[in-house]
């Protein structure tokens, strides 16, 4: 009986698949047949949700992680109450066809790492449902290209070009600014994920791309890999000069935990919570939302080195990308965490260690696109 129900669902979804009108080549080199006009787009993961929202919010049919109540005021009303659907780009052999039947997307878009595992997942879901599944390179340096490619796919090329030019300007300005920073002034940084801050990323991890592109040195090393679990002793041994905390619980704990007291970042009061509204400025998800994080982190890593007007930049970014005008209250809310923990921070201090031992844990080769 269950097999019969599943087969009926597959046939129903396939029957609803959009008519093919053109063929595109996605980031994996896959030839994908897509409709000429695309009106309904399902994201396969959180980075895709953000990309679709900033380009064509009226085409977004669901969230993978629904915005929290306190985040919704920073988004357009039309998307605040969209349904939530499960991630499609995981390793599960089961596909819940219910959301596809309800949302009836013309196409599925997946943004992030492009490798064999994600290609296999895309092929499987596309074959099972008959719905075109497009993979998009989500690496931060490729942001402008990804905006243009998806903008063309969705029929919003003019808007995509405007956003792509903002991305290119951000990278060009950053490159010019970093040229004046001596290698010795580039701090050792630890980024802690989770409530205890004991998950981080190795070199090349998509979750730490903002740190890499800003020229800082990841204390976890340059060995390629994904996310890893570490211990407080390991972080003490690395002795980072700056700690970035994905969760306020970790930031507060690191400031008050005796095990962390001798770490340079703790002594120098250089522990910062990464802003998170409506999407993470550093990651979470690792999407186009990170462009604003570049500006924020420039001042964190190199205080006083550049002329950074974060308030003006935040207003401009939210207006252009999220299509909302920030009130003074909203701006204060967004910047409160950053300002609260930046006051009293010391300037860049000379490096003490070039890095200690590599973490002795197994990293995740294909971490979720969170």
Image (tube, rainbow, N blue to C red):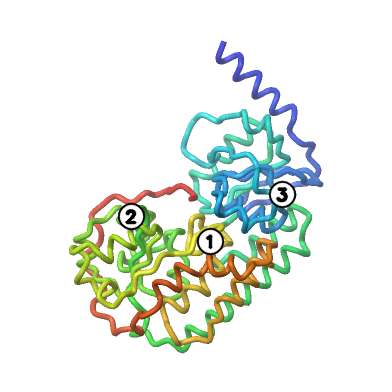
Kindly identify the residue that appears in the image at 39 percent across and 57 percent down.
Answer: 247
Mark-to-mark CA distance, 1 and 2: 21 Å
* Residue at image point 78% right, 64% down: 158
Q: Which mark is residue 139?
A: 1
Q: Is residue 2 above or below residue 262?
A: above
Q: Position of residue 69 (x, y in %)?
A: 56, 49
Q: Is residue 35 above or below residue 287?
A: above
Which quarter of the rendering shows the N terminus? top right
Q: Is residue 342 left or right of residue 24?
A: left
Question: Which label is found at residue 199?
Answer: 2
Task: Name the front one of labels 1 and 2.
Answer: 2
Label 3 sits on residue: 78
Q: Residue 209 location in percent, x, y?
A: 46, 65
Q: CA distance from mark 2 to mark 3?
A: 35 Å
In x, y percent, where is residue 231?
A: 23, 56
Residues at marks 1 and 3 touching, judged by CB atoms closer than 8 Å:
no
User: Relative to 160, is 347 above or below?
Assistant: below
Relative depth, front residue between 299 and 312: 312
């Amino acid at each position: 009986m269950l097999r019969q129900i599943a087969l009926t669902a597959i046939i129903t979804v396939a029957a609803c698949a959009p008519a093919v009108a053109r063929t595109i080549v996605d980031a994996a080199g896959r030839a994908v047949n897509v409709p000429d006009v695309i009106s309904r787009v399902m994201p396969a993961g959180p980075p895709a949700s953000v990309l679709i929202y900033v380009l064509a919010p009226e085409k977004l049919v669901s969230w993978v992680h629904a915005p929290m109540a306190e985040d919704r005021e920073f988004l357009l009303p039309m998307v605040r109450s969209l349904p939530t659907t499960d991630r499609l780009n995981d390793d599960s052999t089961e596909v819940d066809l219910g959301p596809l039947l309800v949302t009836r997307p013309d196409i599925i878009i997946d943004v992030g790492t492009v490798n064999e595992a994600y290609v296999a997942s895309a092929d499987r879901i596309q074959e099972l449902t008959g719905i075109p599944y497009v993979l998009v390179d989500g690496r931060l340096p490729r942001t402008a290209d990804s905006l243009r490619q998806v903008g063309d796919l969705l029929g919003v090329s003019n808007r995509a070009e405007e956003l792509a030019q903002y991305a290119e300007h951000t990278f060009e300005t950053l490159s010019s600014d970093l040229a004046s920073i001596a290698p010795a002034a580039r701090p050792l940084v630890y980024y802690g994920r989770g409530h205890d801050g004991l998950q981080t990323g190795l070199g090349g991890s998509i979750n730490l791309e903002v740190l890499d592109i800003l020229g800082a040195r990841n204390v976890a090393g340059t060995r390629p890999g994904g996310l890893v679990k570490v211990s407080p002793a390991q972080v003490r041994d690395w002795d980072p000069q700056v700690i970035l905390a994905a969760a306020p619980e970790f930031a507060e704990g690191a400031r008050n935990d005796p095990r962390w007291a001798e770490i340079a970042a703790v002594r120098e009061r250089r522990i910062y919570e990464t802003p998170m509204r409506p999407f993470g400025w550093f990651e979470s998800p690792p999407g186009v939302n990170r462009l604003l994080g570049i500006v924020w982190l420039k001042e964190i890593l190199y205080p006083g080195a550049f002329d950074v007007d974060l308030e003006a930049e935040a207003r401009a970014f939210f207006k252009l990308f999220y299509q909302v005008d920030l009130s003074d209250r909203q701006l204060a809310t967004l910047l409160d965490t950053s300002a609260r923990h930046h006051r009293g921070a010391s300037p860049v201090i000379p490096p003490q260690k070039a890095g200690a031992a590599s973490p002795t844990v197994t990293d995740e080769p294909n971490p979720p696109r969170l």
